[in-house]
Image (cartoon, grey):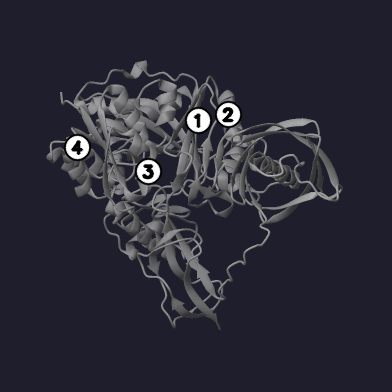
Amino acid sequence: MKNINTILIANRGEIASRVIRTCKKMGITCVAVYSEADKNAPFVKQADLAIHIGDPEPSKSYLDQDKIIVAALRSGADAIHPGYGFLSENALFAQRCLDEGIAFIGPRPQAIQAMGSKSQAKMIMEQSGVPVIPGYKGKDQSDTTLKTEALKVGFPLLLKATAGGGGKGMRIVYEENELDNAITSAKREAKNAFGDDELLIEKYIESGRHIEFQIFGDQHGTIIHLLERECSIQRRYQKVIEESPSPVMTDELRKSMGEAAVLAAKSLDYDNAGTVEFIFDDTTKNFYFLEVNTRLQVEHPVTEAITGLDLVQMQIESAKGLPLRVKQDQIKANGYAIEARLYAEDASNHFAPVTGTIHKFDFPEMEGLRIESAIESGSEISMFYDPMIAKIIVHDTNRQSAHNKLNYVLKNLICQGTVTNQAFLQRLLQHEDFRAGKYDTHFIDKQINLSDINNVSKEHKEEIALAATLYSWYQREVSRKILRSFPSGWRNNFYEYQKEVFFINEEKVTIQYRFLDHNFKILIEENEVDASIIDVSKNLIRLNNNGLQKSYSILQLENDFYVHAADIGNARVIKQDRFPTKEKEKVHGGYESPIPSQIVKIHVAAGEQIKQGSPLLVLSSMKMETVIEADEDGVIEEVYVEEGNNVEAGFLLLKINKN
């Protein structure tokens, strides 16, 4: 048995915090590594030791194997836990750890290598008797061969990068005339994301569910599964909601899928944690192998909630050489668990990631609630990393009870300072078909209206403007030092109202008010409201509005007010300055970066004639590519950036002169 007394965590964010928690529980010293962007992050402060490893770009820090190994040797680490993403499924890194005498907390390098290529993985599974989707997984990657094989498979089909996941290098093709562009773009994206542009082709299952089984092995040949997780609710091929048990699972289906998962693991002589992913065809009720993730999954807390196991502890024990403590027949589901991923992203804008500062992050306490996050009030959401803010996990006796609890958490969770998908998660959770378990991997695209997801009703705008007004009044009142004997807002003309003007989602709201005898008379568009302040505590104010008492969380930063109420959500309220600043003029024909990004590819040059819809640049932010296309025909006047540049939102990228 190998002694593990110190573990270096070759990762960041919430998974680093998660591993640290188990290390401390087991009495193991934990070492964090951090980039310049993460120097003040919570996980860095939580670790026993923390070592700086470079610039914010992952290639210069978390993906730099030399720096990780040097940090491990410097700290005297016996083992490295890779978390997920970054180097977690890099077979060369796993082998290098072993060569350095450092335990790699994950499966053997050979298993990682075998599953590193989706085409090779499918061949291994076919040979082992695991059902696989019909398709092409050959080494001949010429465009001609890919097109020929695609026509054999038939439409719709799926092009998929063999070297990675998360939707990178993946394209659905419905018609032959889409094929050339799909192959080109999928190869380019795969090359940029994984350094390998090999593709495989699969028959595309239009009504499918994504169901995965957690597997676990030790170094003594024992392999078990820890039940399933349903992961069909996805956007951009990335999971948003995970739950267990799956709504479609029967005892018979669980038995056959679980046996297939264990069979897949045995074909790899698998040890440590992993996940076998399947696609379940709603129409035929057949299931097919998708891939094996040779690491801990983001959604592992769902399995922990229903089994009561600590998967990170099991990983460490397996890496030590200890046998599994549980047998297959001891694995029973206790109730139901669901995980919702809270992201810094704009659901109304194709789930585009956003950056910014989380000025306040708070959530209610509740039995059965678990929050996994590396965010705290004041944390920055960086363009360099995944925009996930937190994982919200709820466990209860049944699906309906857990959904009710999760809905309450989402209503009362305060995340102020940047746009999030919180309102989207609430709408999803309240959808009748989702609550009934009737969904597939296209559910979001087909069933959720995103156009109005961030809208605030007129009544709610007036309500939060009123709350901001009285909060602002109170702060001025308690801080004023002169004429304190005069009533607040005193005027020579008693009947004249004080006035505040706010903008909420660019809509103007005017609040007129007068304070007398501890009460306010409020005028909003000629409607009179009686209001009073019941209590104020830090950033919380409780108001009486026409007899209805209600609490609001309000954070004021100069003229910006971040207001939260349970039935409204999080809203930004901008107070009009007495001397408004002039807005920056737009450059005619100019194209700006919509979000902080890195310039991945420039398709045009100065003087080049372009057509409407032509690709101009490819931007990358938070692991997602965005293609900037021409709005009209014209000539490129000037390009202001170079490939590899990092730019802020609003940065002028290039300029086009209209024909």
> Of helix, strand and loop, which one carries label 3?
loop
Query: Residue at 56% across / 45% down in the picture?
Result: 444
Query: Which-is-in-front pick, marks 1 and 3?
Result: 3
Answer with mark 1 or mark 3, whichever residue precedes in sequence.
3
4 vs 2, front mark: 4
Looking at the image, is mark 2 or mark 3 nearer the viewer? 3
* Circle 1: element type: strand
Q: CA distance from mark 1 to mark 3?
A: 30 Å
Distance from Cα at disc 2 to Cα at disc 3: 34 Å
The circle on residue 403 is: 2
What SS does tag 4 mark? helix
Work out how far the residue at label 4 is from the one at label 2, CA to CA, in angstroms.
Answer: 44 Å
Residue that badge 3 annotates: 40
Q: Amino acid at mark 2?
A: His
Dot 1 crowding, Cα within 10 Å, few <14, some 14–19, many 20+: many
Q: Say what amino acid the circle numbered 4 marks.
A: Ser
Cβ atoms at labels 1 and 3 below 8 Å apart: no
Mark 1 lies on residue: 338
Instruction: Say whether residue 90 is visible.
Output: yes
Figure quadrant of the C terminus: bottom right
- Image position, residue 594 (x, y; %): 51, 61
Q: Which mark is residue 75?
A: 4
Q: Is residue 34 left or right of residue 388?
A: left
Please name the amino acid that badge 1 sits on: Ile
The alpha-carbon separation of the residues under discs 4 and 1 comes to: 37 Å
Q: Disc 4 versus disc 3: distance between alpha carbons?
A: 20 Å
